[in-house]
Image (tube, rainbow, N blue to C red):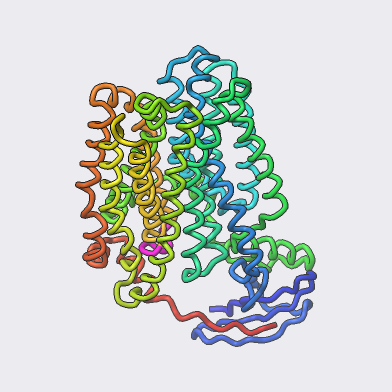
Amino acid sequence: MSPNPHVSGFSGDGQIDLVISRESSQGQKNTEKSSPSTVVENDPFYVDFEENDNRDPVNFSHFRKWTITITACAFTGIVAAASSSFTMGFDTMMRDLSCTEFQATVGLSLYTIGFGVVPLVTSSFSEEFGRHRLYIVCSFVFMLSEVAVALAQNIQTVIIARALGGGFGSTGATLVGGTIADIWRPQQRGLPMSMYALAAVSSTGLGPVIAGWIDANPRLGWRWIQWVHVIFTAAYFVAVLVFMKETRSSIILSRIARKVRKDTGDGRYRARAEDEKRSLSTMIYISCTRPLRLLLTEPTVQSFSLWVGFTWGVLFCLVESVSPELQSIYGFGVGETGSAFAALTLGSILGFIANMYQETLYQKYHARKGQEARLYLACAAAILLPTGMYIYAWTASPNVPWIAPLIGLTIFMFSAYVIYQVVFIYLADCYGPFASSALAGQSLFRNLLATAFPLFTQQMFARLTYRWANTMFAIIATAMIPIPYVLFLYGSKIRARSKVSRMILEAESQQPPPEKKSKA
């Protein structure tokens, strides 16, 4: 067996300064300094980051990390606001396009189905082309889809453009979790991931607040809801070009290796990702099938997907039903009902603040509870979720002040934020190298339910009334209370019986401790 040189250390100005780690057949390593003209056998020279190399995304400065994190989360907020604010323009859209409310609702639903389905295919492109390029492409095409909606002359154009917007918006939004994982170490991800969840959940309420007052102005209407989104997305597109950087380390190393090959004319300089990379078709096949396999076979993924999927479906029912309910019961105008959605944003902010306490509990009990230390706040949210729904269902009455149902909405959204946040962090902790697939599986299920629920909302509320329809949702949420408690108490035992979890544990136990690299 011939020695296998491993190369690390390239200076930022393009000059090569290499440390070659030669591994013998006995597994012993020798390190030697190499000049550019040195030739060591015919095996590849693997390019890697040095320790504390500032080109390694985890070694970016805190200022750059937070700039990237905030910019990435901004896209999540924009696409979430575009999802829910669309409903505030239903009345003027139906008037201008001579369409039915059900046809307008299809535009809402197809947007969410794009969120669930499209990332199964496009997630592979981040491995092939990097995250930065996808942010650029997705934000630009998302902006064009909003322009198409604003200029649409019929409902069919609106539906098609919304489907495209959901697809490209989802691709950008689902990249954010990966971007955070690229630049923050595991023990540092709590706050960045909380910001991501806050952007995703709070903007669902913030969008209608603004859109309600836009639609209330007779000189503006539903088209200007879209034009405002175009303005925000255009500003974001510029921010991506200015502030975002590539954060996927395998892409960065591949670019360094290509530059060194070009500068030296020596084709042996390689990034490991170049040799290990599968074909794009294979990656797409894996990204489409593995999430479904985990969703169908892993009890942890199944239970949390069911919980967050139901919560997300109810949220989109509320997004569509809050306006007509408050208008019929309290006589609110479209602007006032839009302002009522501020309760959803407030609930998200309270959930964000409460998550700080959850992080404290995690740091305190992680050594004893492991991944289940993420679930303390989730256990409280399991009880508060149906509580908020019962309050909203039974206080929406002309005899009860309007603030009472909004308190119920705030409690509901607090719980929805906590559930959304804990699903991302807990599944990422449990499934390690398969975290992206586990999260893609729950995202698919969650968005499919968010697609389906609004389609039967009108008929359900018409037959059961708002009070009893929302009570039915609350009863189902009550039946789901045991989910986080079962995982909190028995999660480690459940994973121990899982084939995928056992494989992850075996791989981690066989992984040697990281070596300290020599500095070139």
Say left or right for 378 vs 497: right
Q: Residue at x 67, y 37 (%)?
A: 231
Say left or right for 5 vs 89: right
Residue 63 percent coordinates (x, y): 65, 66
Indicate the quadrant containing the C terminus: top left, top right, bottom left or bottom right.
Answer: bottom right
Let me know if residue 60 appears in the view. Answer: yes
Residue 236 percent coordinates (x, y): 65, 45
Q: Nearer the viewer, residue 515 or 83?
A: 83
Q: Residue furthest top?
A: 98
Residue 41 percent coordinates (x, y): 66, 77
Let me know if residue 291 appears in the view. Answer: no
Q: Residue at x 55, y 14 (%)?
A: 96
Residue 406 percent coordinates (x, y): 37, 41
Would you say residue 22 sits in the magenta stretch?
no
Tell me which segment is drawn in magenta: 429-435
* Relative vertical location of residue 166 with respect to residue 21 in this rendering, above or below: above
Magenta stretch prevailing secondary structure: helix
Q: Nearer the viewer, residue 414 or 513?
A: 414
* Relative vertical location of residue 495 with respect to residue 115 in this rendering, above or below: below
Would you say residue 433 sits in the magenta stretch?
yes
Q: Residue at x 62, y 42 (%)?
A: 139
Say left or right for 255 vs 454: right
**Total of numbered circles in the picture?**
0
Q: Residue at x 26, y 67 (%)?
A: 492
Q: Nearer the viewer, residue 337 or 299?
A: 337
* Relative vertical location of residue 500 with respect to residue 281 in this rendering, above or below: below
